[in-house]
Image (cartoon, helix red, strand yellow):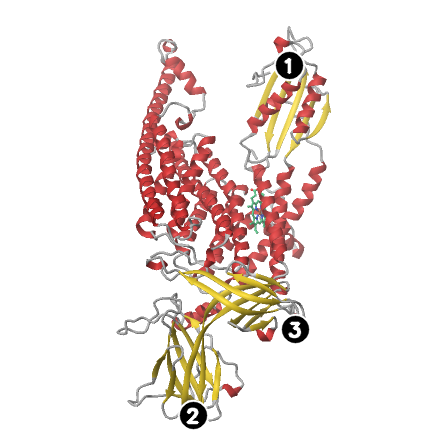
Amino acid sequence: MSVDETLASASNSLVYSAMAVYTLALGASAMDLAGLGERATARNRRKQQGRQALQAASRQPAVVGAGAAGPVVRTSATQEPVPLAEDGAPRKAAGIATSLTVLALLLHLGGVVTRGLSAHRAPWGNMYEFSVTGTSVVVLVYLLVLTRRDVRWLSTFVLAPVLLSLGLAVAVLYTDSAPLVPALQSYWLIIHVSVAFVSSALFVLAFSTTVLQLVQERREAQRAAGATPGAGRFMEALPSAADLEKLSYRLIAISFPLWAFTLVAGAIWAEVAWGRYWNWDPKEVWTFIIWVVYAAYLHARATGGWNGRRAAYLSMAGFACLMINYGVVNTVFPGNHSYAGIG
Amino acid sequence: MTSVQERRPALPEPPGSDRPAGLGLVGWARWTWRQLTSMRTALLLLMLLAVLAVPGSLFPQRNIDQVAVAQYFQDNPDSAPWLDRLSLFDVYSSPWFSAVYLLLFISLVGCVLPRTKVHVANLRQAPPRTPARLSRLPEHRTVEVDAAPGDVLRVAQDVLRSRRYRTADFGDDRHGPSMAGQRGELRESGNLLFHLALVGVLIAVGIGGLYGYRAQVIVQQGQAYTNQVTAYDSWDPGAYVDGSALPPFSFALNALRVAFDEDSSGNQFGAPRSFEADVTVTDAPGQAPRQEKIRVNEPLRAGGASVYLAGNGYAPVITVRNGAGEVVFDQGTPFLVQDANYTSTGVVKVSDPAGDLGLQGLLLPTASEDSSGPPVSTFPDLRNPEVLFFAYTGDLGLDDGVPQNVYELDTSRMQRVTDVDGQPLRFSMKPGDTYDLPNGLGSVTLDRIDRFAGFTVRHDPARAMALTFSLLAIVGLTASLFVPRRRVWVRAAPATGDAAQGRTLLEVGALARSEDHGLAGEADAVLSAVLARLPARDTDQTPSDKPPRQEEP
Ligand code: HEM
């Protein structure tokens, strides 16, 4: 069957439009973060003033109740501060960013679907398509997480890598739409790769939250040592390092069995295609390595003394392996999986 | 689990386990075993396994591509033997890689078996007694209800049971009647199932390696082959395979249909689109033959083995006549495909008492019309086929009894045939052409160009076992990650106070014993379920169930 050129070029236009709207969404979410940063700084300043007022009050009891400072002191001194990003106060920029992200994703998915339709197959037959479809799954998973809890503070750290990958895809990896080579003509391609997409998307999100967790941890350590953390005011508004760690863990915990399934589905497909369910082909090797590294992460988290920071390094190593598996193994290493199709 | 400490292995290491306990061999052995089966060792071995798996993707591996390994030796004559000594071309069967995964699995068994024992004992144990102060627990709810304590506890028991808690009624103690519920043992069961299933996978892989076989055979269009060791071009059996007792199926390749992309531009032009082999299969001598198709991704299952279409190419059919005009060679010769446009190379070996003839051939399925450059093929299908030959005479060495590579010519005892100018003779033919060799050496006729298919035959008796254990592992893993382990205690003490006549102070306390973000919701859910089921005695006193009223006792 030949390729429908109209649909193929429609797909390209949709992907470009999606990128434009993502860019706007990224701008809005960056503004939101900046705004959060402002509010966080103001809150810290208030806290600071409150502390000073409290100190003053303990010296001069007459001041208590003399002004509005009194109740402020009491509430902020007794309550755990809720991260600004989750305190429910209206955030116009964040709302705009989310709406734009939804719009961009619709365009993006349109691009993915038309690409698939143009060649009458699943839209993941080469690196360009992996990138375009994979990034759409990342955004989709982010929006799904968003329906369950307010993680809009994460959007900048989702949209930026997504835009970067899309840019790379259209600029470097682009391949004209075409049918599949026989080796890929299997429904296992659909099962194996689609689960891999979802799982990778979760790992990508977990990577973002892990990086934020490590940054937050540093800032908390600096603060505990009496220093004022430098740049990155917006971090004040984000959840604590411990909460970020929990979120990273949950993302990885969901992704890990999916990756195991990817591995098994890949093995079944290899059996069907090559007559050997496990052949230590480079792509298999790296899929296995990723799985083992995340298994190490889960073990590390369960081992005393390895919690937090050191487990986070393992999760980052897992992500690095994911990127190697995706970017390097397809193109550089010799093996049966050389379907990159880069022109 | 609420704290890091709780997530440690169920078997706490005895104090002083960081050095050998006691003296002598037994002490050392016990110490080593404890180290090996500790969680930290498992973690290190896992990381080591990941790191050691990397070089196998950097260096060509014999199990995947022998040719690439040979090429590596040719390109790096100095370093390759050293790398070979370190098993870097056989990483996954190397002593060091094997050592790590075997240690890992020993550690796993040493860790999981005692845990299984503890777990089985735990399953039969009653939940622990109600703590004196439920308000100390991570989640705690209290509400005063208009019901008798006994009724409240009975309802609480139903609620907990319906939520799959194992319950224990502790009756009345100093703090009032109370009961406990515990659930989520499935989490640990899942964890144990997962780890043991990994052992199962490893065993299945081992069995497949020992009792399975893998073979390759090239079959030209119109030819047949039988499942016998002698019929194969390569034969790779497991250690316990009896090569003389293979299932006696056979099949003939009737036709091989291929399609290449003629529509796309760029690098997709000429890409393969479909390979399909029509075969006639006979499962055993004397049985009725059946017609089957084999495609990539659609193997043929026969005689407990699977037959895969692994490759294809062209086999020029050549007739060679000697100087006396007698036919000395008449058959197809598979050529090896060299590139995406199916430029192929092969050799024809004609042994003749009068003197052997060797032909080195280069096949171009679609020879480029542009004759200025070197000969190239521009499309993989047979659009403008052409075969270029070099000829050699002398001794092929076929009578030495040493097995030869059928794709290479040993020219050590042969001379190149030259043309009238003394240049190496090179002649090009199209199907149907006949070329007369100089010096009365005879003639070569290219009758036609057939296709051949490369089939891989694989038998793995433990395939289903490996799949079963993999799926069990995933099921166990999912349970071990997502089933929450929880304890809930309910206390129903007679309320005290002025208007407390016949009323009960209901307390619910909950404790998570695993990573659990839903504990607060669970405490709320238990409480509201109890409230909803309590018989309403006094309408205006019926407590609202959402959100439950919270007060400190
Ligand atoms: C083949 C190697 C292994 C793999 C792939 C593996 C994988 C995993 C995974 C993915 C988990 C996470 C499940 C969870 O968090 O509940 C886990 C948990 C666990 N593993 Fe392993 N494991 C391996 C070997 C071992 C070994 C050798 C030991 C013992 C020394 C061990 C002991 C444990 C324990 C105790 C847990 C539970 C941690 C907890 O309580 O949360 N594992 N393993």
Residue B539: % across, % down: 63, 9
How many labels sit on residues?
A: 3
Residue A21: % across, % down: 32, 37
Residue B391, above or below A69? below
For the residues marked 3 and 2, what is the alpha-carbon distance in whole angstroms?
Answer: 44 Å
Residue A299, above or below B373? above
Q: Which residue is mark 1?
A: B145
For mark 3, give the secondary structure: helix
Q: Which residue is mark 2?
A: B323
Tell whether B526 sits left or right of A315: right
Query: Farthest residue in the front direction?
Result: B432
Q: Would you say residue B77 is visible in this rendering?
A: no
Give the mark toward the camera: 3 or 2.
Answer: 2
| Kind of residue at badge 3 | Ser
Which of the marked residues, 1 or 3, is nearer the chain's N terminus? 1
Question: Which residue is drawn at the image coordinates 34% and 28% (left, top)?
Answer: A36
Query: Farthest residue in the top direction?
Result: B498
Q: Foreground: A7 or A286? A: A7
| Kind of residue at badge 2 | Gly
